[in-house]
Image (spheres, helix red, strand yellow):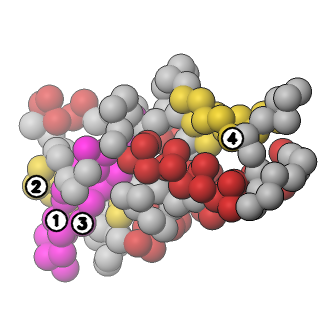
């Protein structure tokens, strides 16, 4: 596409509402809180600042490609993508809308911001089942379908489900 002058920060944020997490496609990068900032540089470049959910997250490369493609498809160039690691991402940054989307998608949203240290004492956190709402659940594995999720099972409806672990 033909290069155009950079739109406003708000316009770019609206465009970026279309960028979803490749591992949990119902969540946008804004829902997850990994989109930290958009900066319009003096030279006209648009810089998008993102933070990974955890160091080494394999989805970040796909997210960068998608951000660049969405903006370039709208004629926004040049695009710079910066990754910042501090402060480290936390599940506190997931929006309320994002938490609701997780629940509707069948993934239990994170309960608190701190890591689950109960596992050190062989006690599992009580996570409500996203299917039936029962708190009669058990952790099957600390590691689920992706590194940021744990695998649980509801003892009432017998359905397995992912829990988005706290960071």
Magenta highlight range: 147-167
Q: Secondary structure at mark 4?
A: strand
Image position, residue 142 (x, y; %): 16, 44
Q: Earlier in the sequence, mark 1 or mark 2?
A: 2
Foreground: 26 or 141? 26
Q: Taking 36 as reference, is 66 above or below it?
A: below
Checking the image for residue 153, the label placed there is: 1
Q: Secondary structure at mark 3?
A: strand
Q: Secondary structure at mark 1?
A: strand
The alpha-carbon separation of the residues under discs 4 and 3 comes to 38 Å
Foreground: 31 or 123? 31
Q: Are marks 1 and 4 in contact (CB under 8 Å)?
A: no
Residue identified by numbered label 4:
79
Horizontal placement of 93 versus 151: left or right?
right
Residue identified by numbered label 3:
161
Horizontal placement of 126 versus 64: left or right?
left
Image position, residue 25 (x, y; %): 45, 65
Checking the image for residue 34, the label placed there is: none
Q: Secondary structure at mark 2?
A: strand
Q: Residue at x 24, y 66 (%)?
A: 161
Q: Earlier in the sequence, mark 4 or mark 3?
A: 4
């Amino acid at each position: 596409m033909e290069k155009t002058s950079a739109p406003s920060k708000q316009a770019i944020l609206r465009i970026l509402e279309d960028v979803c997490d490749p591992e949990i496609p119902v969540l946008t990068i804004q829902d997850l809180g990994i989109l930290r900032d958009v900066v319009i540089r003096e030279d006209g470049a648009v810089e998008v600042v993102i933070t990974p959910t955890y160091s080494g997250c394999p989805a970040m490369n796909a997210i960068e490609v998608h951000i660049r493609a969405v903006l370039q498809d709208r004629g926004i160039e040049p695009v710079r993508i910066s990754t910042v690691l501090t402060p480290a991402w936390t599940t506190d940054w997931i929006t309320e809308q994002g938490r609701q989307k997780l629940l509707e998608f069948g993934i239990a949203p994170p309960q608190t911001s701190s890591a689950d240290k109960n596992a050190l004492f062989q006690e599992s956190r009580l996570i409500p089942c996203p299917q039936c709402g029962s708190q009669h659940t058990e952790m099957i594995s600390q590691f689920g379908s992706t590194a940021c999720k744990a695998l649980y099972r509801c003892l009432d409806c017998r359905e397995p489900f992912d829990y988005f672990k706290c960071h």
